[in-house]
Amino acid sequence: MDTRTGLPVVGMVGGGQLARMTHQAAIALGQSLRVLAAAPDDGAALVVADLHFGDHTDLTALRTFAKGCDVVTFDHEHVPTDLIRALAADGVAVHPGADALLYAQDKRAMRERLSALGAPVPHWRPVSAPEEVSAFGDEVGWPVVAKAVRGGYDGRGVWMLGADDALPDVELILEKRVPLRRELAVLVARSPFGQVAAYPVVETVQQDGICVEVLAPAPGLAEDLAVAAQQLAIDIATSLGVVGLLAVELFEVDGGVLVNELAMRPHNSGHWTIEGARTSQFEQHLRAILDYPMGETALTAPAVVMANVLGGPPGGISLDERLHHLFATDPGAKVHLYGKQVRPGRKIGHVTVLGDDMDDVRARAARAARWLREGRASGPEGK
Ligand code: ADP
């Protein structure tokens, strides 16, 4: 507890853009986020006053960091569960806890648990020997999807395997390649009291394994399917005992949805909520882990689009000049930059546009993101 303000101290392990944006939400709640960063140029390390440095796999560093925190939470999923258990045994409130976080760290455990809960998932199998891959591929059709059990993100750790392809040398699960129509995501928050709040279902548009756009609400999604997807996410959060945010990434297929992935932290598919929902995901995460009542999740406009800003090719006009032009041509576009050094393909920020017409809002968001990336409004193909 901060004795000066009488408000809680939240510690976040990891100093990336999620911690940076959670800090913004903490400020409005009268708090100052404490961050355990790895390097001085981490996105949150550049802006947080209560800053600690240390490795998230070092128990001593975690213990020192947790001292004086009312709650410890995460901006990534890489803290080993045995260290989280050690902190909890010290009496630290850690949210989400190790028993839940496991399912965001280990794809095999996640698939096993979701299958046991009866949640719809792609047909899958763990694999321990190469012969099992050919048997699985012959059964479900080639190519099959191989996924690293641990450590994958942004499509790294996912391979489409043909019958003659060599197996990546990591622990894998296999999945049937499902004919997905599009990808959806549902974000829910759950408090220790057990209150849950679900955001509207969104469409996530992926390119090369990276989420490039999020459309809220998911265009054309039937109301009954949207409600079923929200209920599914709430059921998963409740069954796994998640405290904080849970992002459930879904595949839309003929006749329903399948669960692809779980994340237990603020998520890229929820950045649109900063301007596009009554309560941002970052505030909601803080409310949930502090056991405050949840905030309203309703949209603030009929159509909301978030587009990620990726680092573009070197050269061209400065980012400062790009911002100047963007603000001149689209005063409604809201820009969030993460203080990162620009590298081609790296997520350096996002833009959010709100409006009445999804096509119009989407075109504006795409234009703004492309402009910030490349310093020009149209692509090589002249679109
Ligand atoms: P990561 O954890 O790296 O984000 P995902 O499991 O989300 O990996 O997979 C990355 C992308 O690969 C997905 O967004 C989807 O486009 C594709 N993909 C993953 N699993 C399947 C599958 N079973 N069938 C078809 N496409 C898939």
Image (cartoon, helix red, strand yellow):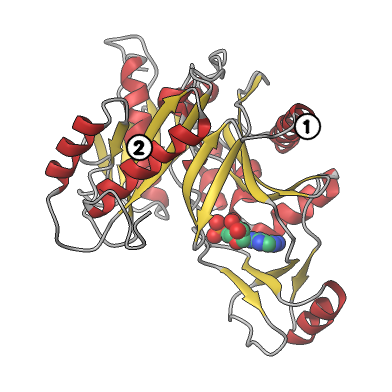
> CA gap, disc 2 to disc 1?
29 Å
| Vertical placement of residue 105 versus 140, above or below | above
Q: Is 150 displayed left or right of 208 in the figure? A: right
Q: In this image, 310 relative to 147: left or right? A: left
Numbered tag placed on residue 228 in the rendering: 1
Residue 351: numbered disc: 2
**Quadrant of the frame with the C terminus:** bottom left
The quarter holding residue 233 reads top right
**Tag 2 near tag 1, CB within 8 Å:** no
Which residue is outermost to the front?
Answer: 382
Name the element at disc 1. Answer: helix
| Residue name at image x 79 percent, y 78 percent | 137
Pointer 2 or 1: first along the chain? 1
Point out the quarter of the image occupied by ligand 1.
bottom right
Q: Residue furthest bottom?
A: 164
The amino acid beneath tag 1 is Ala
Helix or strand or loop: what does disc 2 sit on?
strand
Q: Which amino acid does label 2 sit on?
A: Val
Packing grade of label 2 (10 A; few <14, some 14-19, many >=20) is: many
The image position of residue 155, as x and y in percent, is 53, 62
Answer left or right for 299 relative to 48: right
Q: Position of residue 21 (x, y in %)?
A: 35, 33
- The answer to whether any part of residue 16 appears in the image is no
Name the residue at 63% across, 64% down: 149
